[in-house]
Image: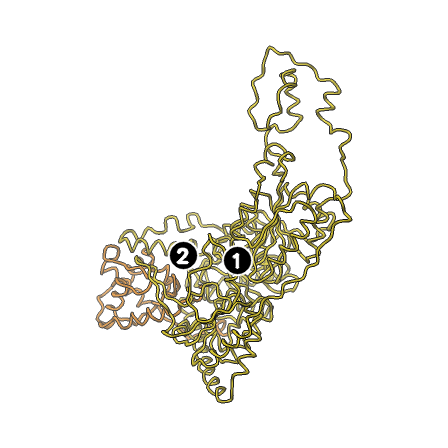
Chain colours: A orange, B yellow
Amino acid sequence: MHRFKRIAVAAFAVSALGIAGAVSAQDAPQGDAANGKRVFLADGCFTCHGRSGQGGAYNGPAPILAHTALPFDGFQGVVRNPPNDMPAYSEAVLSDKDVADIYAFVESLPGPRSPKDISILNN
Amino acid sequence: MSKRRHLPDSSRRNFLKGAGLVGAAAAVTPPVAANAIPAAPQEKLKAAVPGARQIAAETMAPSNDPVNQTTSGGDFMVDVLNSLGVEYMAINCASSYRGLHEAVINHGNNKPEIITCVHEDIAVHVAQGYAKIEGKPMAMACHGVVGLQHATMAMYNAWCDRVPVLVMGGNIMEADKRAPGAEWVHAGVDIGQIVREFTKWDDQPASLQHFAESAVRAYKIATTPPMGPVFLALDAELQENPIRDAEGLRIPKFAPVVPPQGDSGAIAAAAKMLVEAQNPLILCDRVARTPTGMANLVELAETLQCGVIDNAGRMNFPSRHPLNQSFRRGLIGQADVILAIEMNDLWGTVSHFSDRIVRRSRPATKPGAKIVTLGVRDLYLKSNYQDFGRWQDVDLDIAGDGETSLAPLTEAVKRLIDEGRKAAYDARGKKLAAAHLAMVEQSKTDATIGWDASPITTARMCAEVYNQIKDEDWSVVGTSIRLSWPHRLWDFKRPYQWNGGSGGAGIGYNLPASLGAALANKKHSRFTVAFGGDGDFMFNPGALWTAAHHKIPMLYIVHNNRAYHQEYMYLVAMAARHGRGVDKMDIGTTIKDPNIDYATVARGMGVYGEGPIVDPKDLGPALSRAIAVVKSGETAVVDVVADPR
């Protein structure tokens, strides 16, 4: 079974995301988070990464995107030319504006909380 | 409804009704098949009124034909099945094995107990799930040809999962004994051919003694590692007719095969490689066949203080054991010696593969890493279906049952470990334990993201379930695709707390196989819980009727993402690759408009239904109500509208 396989893929993807970025989050183009959410859901981003950006799985684990600290350039670089099995979204299906809007959306998503605050996670 | 006598105008009485019209012509017309087009009436011929003798000849059996019998071959078949300790026989009733069916009920006093199923796919999957919990096969009976054709997908799952199931299909071997119509289309010269590519063995016994020997042989073959389904075609006459030569019949003695242990020299060589390795790693998939398996694997890992990556084909290794590194696959690239035990897909586990325009693979192992395999999987392979996976180079390939070979391997390792190594091993173990703990904490942190979201996150869905069953003697026997949260968060430590997946990834497994596992758990008073996808659910929802009918307790969580979600993702990838229409990939991949109300479907099948649960705050109370139902001895379904993964 491959249920738990390729956790390393996720690590590689996150690593690639981090290395690729040279522009800080503050330098990202102003995105429309509301439109970003719409595109995130309509264009299938949520299918692997979850509606809350909590991550998920495709052929291997799909990285967490919620409250991303990744720089915009790195994010866009992965969208256009992703590592591993993530589909490459070209400008033909996802404009630069859409990418910026999605970035604004995932950046706006709340990240993880302390699990200590959720009693049933400590069973 | 009988599957045998459903063709129109097939009865002798209907034939006689036409006698008044066709008259003398009928007397010379050769018998025709019941479904043949009748010749046009010849009006010139006058009908002759049949006399009493003709009516008697047409309607009554000859006086010298016996009409009662005191024994039947089916009775003997039941005795054979009971001699093997077969507890249950899952069936969808059919005329071609009516002799056996009646004999089970009346001669066997419903032993093996009949589990009534509304589809043959359900029946085989029930048997598959049962075997993985109970550790022995149950029987399944179906109609020859058409019933067996229905059963094939589940038999393929059992084959790929290496699970024993004793499948029997009725047949009418002698052509002159087949009634017109259905008995012809439901008969075959060699019905085992339908399933031969994914069964270990099959036979069509020609006598009762032949049946007895073949049934015992089939049971033995099925339960000898590598295990798998077997098939027997049962001639209807053999089942139904009186036993001839009863004094000559004998039920063979069954002695299980002692599973083969790896060669002692090879075991010693493997032990030396593991002991001398800097970073040994154990990979496993279907190791634990019995409760001993997990304990033996734990002992080997603790002796070596090495990591274990469990592909979870069985309940191999405790989820919270410090050496469990199943979510740290990067260790594969660090290992210098890998011991792969009873692996289903070794190549897939030690390789990176890219599902892109050009499909490539590369090793995940580091250069020079040695691979030792231990198992029996490759001792029985077939050609057509490619479930054996891609070739993987290895350095030492030990043919031997993994579970059986663990103890001598551990002893060989212990003999080679000196005091000097123990300190290094302890240090290695502490690092792994710390990494395991960090992984668990990271999982908990990850699980908090979207905690209050709707649709409900899969992490919260699983956490809510565990919160309410953790103090029960629980057994998780099903999961939706790529739902890893239970193994990331729950404390799996008993041999029956997990039983692996479908094997063949044939959809429709989860609900009926979970039910079969629940049937096995019932007599041990365990609390059975299963997750399953909504797509899988709709392949075999009728399994819930069986749950209700036989009062099998089970908590079934429908992971309802309203899609065939893996396919949805694949289609998005295709559209992105082709640079078009990524926003239309819900066509043909989603299950919405209308949404299916699984709780209502469940209630329609006679079991308890909750949902759809959309708000995460409603999930805990819904689970509480459902769990109370399960504790009362029934199945409860909770429909959770959840995120995809």
**Residue named by callout 1:** B638
User: Label 1 sits on what residue type?
Assistant: Val
The answer to whether marks 1 and 2 sit on the same chain is yes
Residue A114 vertical placement versus B244 (above, below): below
- Of the 4 image quadrants, the one containing the N terminus of chain B is top right
**Residue named by callout 2:** B566
Q: Measuring 43% from the left and 78% from the top, which residue is drawn there?
A: B438
Q: CA distance from mark 1 to mark 2?
A: 22 Å
Residue A81 location, quadrant: bottom left
In the figure, is residue B338 to the left or right of A22? right
Q: Residue furthest top?
A: B44
Give the crowd class for mark 1: few <14, some 14-19, many >=20 residues within 10 Å.
many
Mark 1–mark 2 CB contact (< 8 Å): no
User: Label 2 sits on what residue type?
Assistant: Gln
Q: Position of residue B123 (x, y in %)?
A: 58, 51
SS assignment at label 2: helix
- Output the chain of dot 2: B
SS assignment at label 1: strand
Q: Residue furthest front?
A: B265
In the figure, is residue B387 to the left or right of B578? right
Residue B68 vertical placement versus B350 (above, below): above
